[in-house]
Every structure is written in structure tokens, then in C-alpha cells.
Image (cartoon, rainbow, N blue to C red):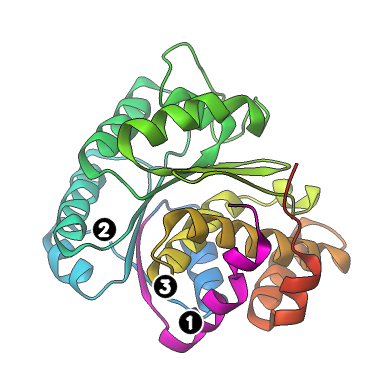
Amino acid sequence: MTDADLLNPWKSIQDIRRMAPVVHSITNYVVMNNTANALLALGASPVMAHAEEEMAEMVAISAALVINIGTLSSVWIRSMFTAAEHARKRGIPIVLDPVGAGATTYRTSTARDFINTARPCIIRGNASEIMALVSDSVRSKGVDSQDAASAALSAAQSLQQAFGSTVCISGETDHIVGEAGLIQVRNGHSMMTRVTGLGCTATALCGAFAAVEPDPMRAAAQAMIVMGIAGEMAAEGARGPGTLQVRFLDALYCLTQRDVEERMRLGS
């Protein structure tokens, strides 16, 4: 599935803007504001809630659940698993960002346990994080990848086959591995790596697209296309990472069909 027409990001953008799906995010302290604003700019409705006592009710009003393990604690982990249990019962798409997997045993085992239990429809991470999910020999230095996205293809395929999840590997070229094969997205800008939390933002956008697009492979590809295009547009007038952050939100908000159709770049 590599035909740009089949992906149709613009239709999903219109659906998000029309439906304003609630995206429930249990995410980290560093990126809460960033991801909430990005979801709002795109047209979705973000909820940042992590109290275990309200998980059942919060999931009940949500169209997607995004789990981000960036700032782990035992209390939050219980909330993540509780939310996922209710999301599975309701058929709500679950998206996982295994932030920093491979850096410590605690977060690696948490991510693996979550995948095994919750069976997320989309797993999005950098190459090192994805590789750490299947191999104890991979060690990361935190949230930054030490490997190219293409190096994690074998690990992504293993995860997809074992759990049925679409696996999105972020990098200079994004690789989306799903049941239908491989999609490569070549949008983005190098300055985006200088802004903390944009990877987490990509995961949040995966949640927004999964809320309106039932095929998780298409949803992940659409999210990465839109993420990359908005980053390119933001970088064009940015003096540095600070102005890029602001311009990125503006780009998401102002994105047009022409922007998507003219800028979308797929393939190796």
C-alpha cells in the first residue's frame, strides 16, 4: 500500500476538524502542553488525565487512547493498564509511545508488558526504542535514537507479526510497518529534532488519526505525513527551534488540501 490516493490524509484531516474526536493521553510532564496544543490545532479535543480513579469514565468519552511512558511512575503505570483495559472493551484504538525503551530495565519491561496486555493498534517510536522492545542487547541513551529508522525494520516486523500492531519508526524517513506491508514517509525537517517532544506529538497525532481512520496503518502514515509537512512549513520561516514550535502549531491549524497534495512525499 504505497499509493498516495489510498492514504488520503486530507479526508482524515477534514474528519478530525468536523468531529473533534476526544484523544485521551496519559503522557509525560515534559510534553503535555505541546501535545495538547498540537491536537487542538489539528482539530481534535485533547484530554490529559492520569488518575486511576477516573480512567473508566474518561475512556468512555474518548475516541482514542494514547499512552506515553516518558515520565514513568508506578501510579501512572496502573492508570495506563486500567485505561487500556477499558479501551479494549470498548474497541477504542490504543497508541503506545515506548519513550526511552532500552534505557532502563524498568521502562523496557513496562513497555513490553503493555504491548503484551493491551495489544496497541499503533506503536510509534524511534529506531532504538523499537529495537529495544524485542532485543535485550539494545541499549538507548534516553529519548534520542542511536540508530537509523531502517535498522529497526526487522524488529518492527517481529512486533507486527506477534501482536498485530502497526509499528511506526520515526526518522529522517519514517517507516510504517503494518499487515499490508511497508509505507515510507519522507516529509519533515532536520530542525524538528531540536524541539523536545515532537516525537511525542507525532504519537498524539497518530491517536487523532486513528480516531477517524479505522485502518491503523493508514492512520499512522497519515499522521506522519501531516507531522512532516507541518514541520517543513514551520521551518521555512523559523529562525530556530523556538519559533519553529509556534509556527508548527500555526501550520497544523492552517493546513490545506493543496499543502497536503503538493508536499506529501512517499517512498524510499
Is the residue marked by circle 1 packed among few (<14), some (14-19), or many (20+) residues within 10 Å?
A: some
Three-letter amino acid code of the residue under disc 3: Val
Query: Badge 1 is on which residue?
Result: 15
> Can residue 103 be seen in this snapshot?
no
72 or 184: nearer the viewer = 184
- The residue that mark 2 highlights is 50
The first of marks 1 and 3 along the sequence is: 1
Inter-mark Cα distance, 1 to 2: 27 Å
Cα distance between the residues tagged 2 and 3? 23 Å
Tag 1–tag 3 contact (CB < 8 Å)? yes
* Alpha-carbon span between mark 1 and mark 3: 7 Å
Q: With respect to residue 9, does 255 lie above or below?
A: below
Which type of secondary structure does the marked residue at label 1 adopt? helix
Residue extent of the magenta highlight: 1-26
Amino acid at dot 1: Asp
Where does the image place residue 143, in percent across and percent down from the top left? 55, 36
Q: Residue at x 57, y 27 (%)?
A: 152
* Marking on residue 212: 3
In the rendered image, residue 171, in percent from the top left (x then y), is placed at 67, 40
